Amino acid sequence: MFIEQIIVLAIVQGITEFLPISSSGHLALVPALTGWPDQGVVTDIMVHVGSLFAVLVYFWRDVIKLIIGFFELIRFKMTLNAKMALYIILATIPAVVIGLVLKKSGLIDQIRTVEVIAWNAIIYGILLYVADFIGKRTKVMEDMKLPSAIIIGCAQALALIPGTSRSGMTMTAARFLGFERAEAARFSFLLGIPAIAGAGILTALEAWQTGASIPSGAFLAAFLTFFSAIAAIAFLMALVKRMSFLPFVIYRVLLGLLLFAMLYQWIPGLPSIS
């Protein structure tokens, strides 16, 4: 990869990972819209790791509580921190299972298409609007129970399909369950920690086993992603305290329609995309 592609990928990933508009979908669109070679799944995962470190830094107080809760959990001391750590662990399992199925079957590469991204951008954008419109705003993260955590975890598993959005799906599920917008975002980000970390570790192990090396450009992209991700988290957390998810819903629908227009040449003169 050349430096321009690395910078664009870092900015795109950092911004879209935490906004409910699908980071994987946008990463898949970068080569489609620019004509650059596909950066590949390895680079996609590395920039997700950059996003992971941004979460760890921004939510460091919550992360420390989860670490304390984990050690309390293994000592069978069921405190509030231990329960939250347990919920995060159990809610991660659906994404792990679905992720392994997609990877082993080879479907993970086959579903990285513009048409899939366009459909999911629209469908799940509308679903986010419905959840945000009808969902109550009475619960905070400390009100989380195991059934709610599992439901949100299953929603996270669906986000492995490009265009769906991990943060968008988990926030949608949390809003349906009655969690406040900021609390839905907070749990969504914390839930992403083990899933993103696991994907990064798996990629590193596979590279080591095959004797392949992770491209240096992927490491640079991950480093730059950290900074754009911190800015995106701060922006979203401030925004959801003041307004609804409607701007993101509108963006998703317009993006999906634009992609269909480019894919099927609905508008003469519009650049084509495949």
Image: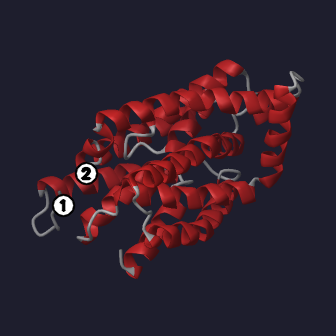
Q: Label 1 near label 2: C-beta < 8 Å? A: yes
Question: Sequence order check: which comes first, mark 2 or mark 1?
Answer: 2
**Amino acid bearing label 1:** Ile
Identify the residue shown where x is 46% and y is 48%. 249
Give the secondary structure at mark 1. Answer: loop
Camera sees residue 245: no
- Side of 76 where 53 appears, left or right: left
Check disc 1: other Cα within 10 Å, few if <14, some if 14-19, many if 20+: some
- Looking at the rendered image, the quarter that the C terminus falls into is bottom left
Note whether 73 is above or below 239 in the view shown.
Answer: above
Camera sees residue 196: yes
Residue lying farthest to the left in this orientation:
268
Q: Residue 243 location in percent, x, y? A: 63, 51
Give the secondary structure at mark 2. Answer: helix
Asked which quadrant contains residue 125, the reply is: top left
- Looking at the rendered image, the quarter that the N terminus falls into is bottom left
Disc 1 target residue? 273
Check disc 2: other Cα within 10 Å, few if <14, some if 14-19, many if 20+: many
Disc 2 target residue? 114
Q: Residue 101 location in percent, x, y? A: 38, 30
